[in-house]
Image (spheres, grey):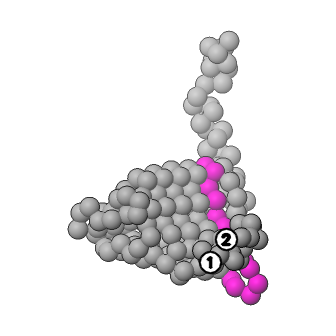
Amino acid sequence: MFYVLYLLFPYKAYSYIRSRRNILRSLWLRNAFKACPNDAYFGKIGHIENPECISLGNGISFGDNFHLYAYMEGEKKPEIIIGNNCCFGADNHITSANRIVIGDHVLTGKRVTISDNNHGDTSNTTLKKAPLDRSVISKGPVIIGNNVWIAENATILSGVTIGDGAVIAAGSVVTKDVSAYNVVAGNPAKPIIK
């Protein structure tokens, strides 16, 4: 059975059809963003919220099931700015209620989360509310420099600046600034090479 399907529909044909579908998706999405060049490439969409607050650079690509959230609450207008020639793996989540700036030539693995916000603080009154009833708060913007590699399953939290050329190891949770040309790992992430 599978052999017959393979003969009728070989993998090369499947790959060709899938790539054409992704190109059509990319053409369709470009006009939704605040800025998006003609060479942006989008895999299968997970979710995009308020794309008019998101600016994308040249040569950018997103893997399948990516999520881009610009969370607007009241008068606040969030901002996501992504530089040139960035490549985001599958299942990446980038969510902003404040400001996220990602430099040029940034590469991420799969399932990376970059967020400048969370649902409420840790006060007793806030914790008594359901998470969805809590106000979204931000400790500050997330700034990621140029030529940064963020490995699989890493999480970047609010108020963090990551310097140029830094490496964030797989599974790391970044809660503090990372200096340029440094390698960090762990939860919370700590330098392993300076």
Percent position of residue 78, x then y: 65, 80
Q: CA distance from mark 1 to mark 2?
A: 6 Å
Q: Amino acid at mark 1?
A: Ser
Q: Secondary structure at mark 1?
A: loop
What x and y, as percent, mark residue 171? 43, 53
The residue under the point 65% across, 75% down is 124
Q: Give x and y (percent) for residue 59.
A: 51, 63
The verdict on residue 69 being magenta is: yes
**Disc 1 to disc 2: CB gap under 8 Å:** yes
Classify mark 2: helix, strand or loop.
Answer: helix
Residue appearing at x 45%, y 62% in the figure: 173
Q: Residue at x 76, y 84 (%)?
A: 74
Three-letter code, disc 2: Leu
Rendering coords of residue 4 (x, y %): 66, 14
Residue 154 seen anywhere in this rendered image of the structure: yes
Give the class, few, some or many, for how many residues have Cα within 10 Å of label 2's Cα (few <14, many ≥20). Answer: few
Write the residue at 70% across / 58% down: 47
* Chain part drawn in magenta: 61-77
Q: Please tell me which residue lies in front, 5 or 88.
A: 88
When asked about the image quadrant of residue 10, the answer is top right
The residue to which callout 1 is attached is: 123
Seen from the viewer's position, the closer of residues 70 and 10 is: 70
Q: Is residue 61 visible?
A: no
Q: Residues within 10 Å of mark 1 (few under 14, many from 20)?
A: few
- List the residue tagged with mark 2: 127
Image quarter (top left, top right, bottom left or bottom right) of the C terminus: bottom left
